[in-house]
Every structure is written in C-alpha cells, then in structure tokens.
Image: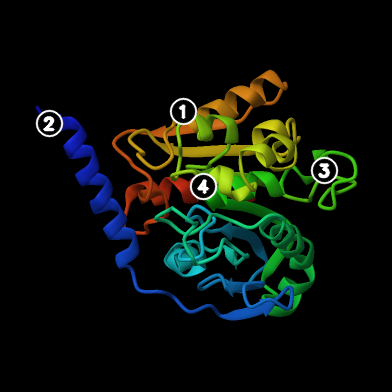
C-alpha cells in the first residue's frame, strides 16, 4: 500500500517549490562583471530605506550547479534581504552545459574547474566592484550565504585558505568574512554521493567517479576544516532534496576538526522555504545572517 506520509511529504515539497518559483523576479539596482563570460556577473541590491553603511550579504544560488537554474530565482530572496536593511550581492557563475549528459535525463552539473574559478574570481573582485556599484555596502562586514549547491559554494569560498598547497584558488590568509550562513547546503560531498543527492550531480561537478577521488580534497567543505570563520547551517528537517543527514555530516566533521558549526533544524520545513520571502523560515534565515553581520 502507498505510504500516506511519504505522499504528503512529496506533495508539500512540490507546493513549497511552486511557492518560491512563483515570485516575480526583482531587478537589481546595479550589475557589474567580474570576467568576460556572460555568466561572470554580480547583481547588487541597495538596502531599502537605509543610506548608511551596512553589512554586505553575498548570496550564491543553488540548482545543482546546472545551467537551467541561474541567479534569477534568488532575486526575490535578495530583495527580501535588502528590505531587511542589508546590501546584497547576488553572484552568477558558470554551471554545467544545458545539454543533458549522454544517456541521462538532466543537464550536466557544474564545470570543472570553471565553477570554482568563477566563485573565487567573484569573491576576489567583490570589494572593488561593490565600492563602485553600491557605496552603502561595508565590505569589511561580509556575510556569505548560499542555498543548496550555493550553500556548498559559500562554505567552499570561506575555506580557500585551507585548500591544498598549489591550488590556484588558495588564499594566503582567511577571507575577511564575518561569517557564513549555509542554507540546506550540499556540505559533505561523500555523504551526498552516498545519498545520491540531486541525481548524480556531485560526481558530475567533479568530472566523474575517478576524478571525484582526486578532486574532493579541493572541493568538499567537509574536507576543508577548520576554517576559523563563524559558520551557521539552517536546514529543514523534511527536506527531500538535500536530506538533513548531509549538513549534519559536515557539522560532525567540523566538530572532529575542533570547530563548532551552528545547526538550526526547522521542523516541518523542506528545501525551498529557506529562500521563500513568503515563508516563516526565510525570516529565521535573515535573523541568522543578522547575528553574524551586525
């Protein structure tokens, strides 16, 4: 017999997804390029009703690093944060090809090394770009947040100073972030592969199973610990896209490395309410960001 609870969970997940994608896009106040590729751009949102210097929230969108999902679906969330008084930078980056993988039904996830090249380049270019595009933003008070695959990239961006020696993305010093708030992040790549999160997207991101073994140490936030940067994870307990076991594995890895990562598990919340301005969970996210930013 069908499991009524499972059916209800799937129905709720579909309703949550429909809600977040139903919001109309919000145009930015400014856009700047950090490279020559069309995807190498950052949209800026000015703090609404506040002309004083305010913290800058950098947001990285999810979508399994796949081409059909761009920063557009995160613009209502960016506007939500701007209405909360933050300056916001919504980063675009190169994702996988729009053409499905041979024998597969979904577009390829991510590009190696371009996805990581772009996140690193965007973060490095951000202080100069924001000074021109959004003078209200205080680049000394940056909080990075990201949802799902974007949560993975946010955690990775905060760990570049602990990348292996010789990595082209390695920083000599920790990035000047106030903190990271990762939303339903694909934070432990090994655990995510075990659970087949996003239908094989993790292996595609790193170039296949053999490449995964070699590249994981340069791409997996759970392998890049401790960072020394304040980190919080917000996760829905009923998330069907990124099960809470994935970020919990990251939190456990951080503890083994001697670092405490905050974990907020929200009851009866799935994957999408965290970035849905109409959902109570989104207000929780804003409060987590505020605790680190101000």
Element type at mark 2: loop
Of label 4 and label 3, which has the lower sequence position?
3
In the displayed structure, 272 sits above or below 44; it is above
**Disc 2 vs disc 1: which is toward the camera?**
2
Distance of mark 1 from mark 3, alpha carbons? 26 Å
Distance of mark 4 from mark 3, alpha carbons? 25 Å
Foreground residue, 238 or 111? Answer: 111
Of label 2 and label 3, which has the lower sequence position?
2
Quarter of the N terminus within the rendering: top left
Which residue does the numbered mark 3 point to in the structure image?
161
Instruction: Name the spot of residue 218 as percent of width and height, x first.
Output: 75, 41
Of label 2 and label 1, which has the lower sequence position?
2
Of label 4 and label 1, which has the lower sequence position?
4
Horizontal relation, residue 17 to residue 58: left or right = left
Q: Is the residue marked by circle 4 packed among few (<14), some (14-19), or many (20+) residues within 10 Å?
A: many
Instruction: Name the spot of residue 49 as percent of width and height, x first.
Output: 51, 73
Foreground residue, 136 or 252? Answer: 252
**Disc 4 vs disc 3: which is toward the camera?**
4
Q: Is the residue marked by circle 2 packed among few (<14), some (14-19), or many (20+) residues within 10 Å?
A: few
Quadrant of res 77 = bottom left
Which residue does the numbered mark 4 point to in the structure image?
201
């Amino acid at each position: 017999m069908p499991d009524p609870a499972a059916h209800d969970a799937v129905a709720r997940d579909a309703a949550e997804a429909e809600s977040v994608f139903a919001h109309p896009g919000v145009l930015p106040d400014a856009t700047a390029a950090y490279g020559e590729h069309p995807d190498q751009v950052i949209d800026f949102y000015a703090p609404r009703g506040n002309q004083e210097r305010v913290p800058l929230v950098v947001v990285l969108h999810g979508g399994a690093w796949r081409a059909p999902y761009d920063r557009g679906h995160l613009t209502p969330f960016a506007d939500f944060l701007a209405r909360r008084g933050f300056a916001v930078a919504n980063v675009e980056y190169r994702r996988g090809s729009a053409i499905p993988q041979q024998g597969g039904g979904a577009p390829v996830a991510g590009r190696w090394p371009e996805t990581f090249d772009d996140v690193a380049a965007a973060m490095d270019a951000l202080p100069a770009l924001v000074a021109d595009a959004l003078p209200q933003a205080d680049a000394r008070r940056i909080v990075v947040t990201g949802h799902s695959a974007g949560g993975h990239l946010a955690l990775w961006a905060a760990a570049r100073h602990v990348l292996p020696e010789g990595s082209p993305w390695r920083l000599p010093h920790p990035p000047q972030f106030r903190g990271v708030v990762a939303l339903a992040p694909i934070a432990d790549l090994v655990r995510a592969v075990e659970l087949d999160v996003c239908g094989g997207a993790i292996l595609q991101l790193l170039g296949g199973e053999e490449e995964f073994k070699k590249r994981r140490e340069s791409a997996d936030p759970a392998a890049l610990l401790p960072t020394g940067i304040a980190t919080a994870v917000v996760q829905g307990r009923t998330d069907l896209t990124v099960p809470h076991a994935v970020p919990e594995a990251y939190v456990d890895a951080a503890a083994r490395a001697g670092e405490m990562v905050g974990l907020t598990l929200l009851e009866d919340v799935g994957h999408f309410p965290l970035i849905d301005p109409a959902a109570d969970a989104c207000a929780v996210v804003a409060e987590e960001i505020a605790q680190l930013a101000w």
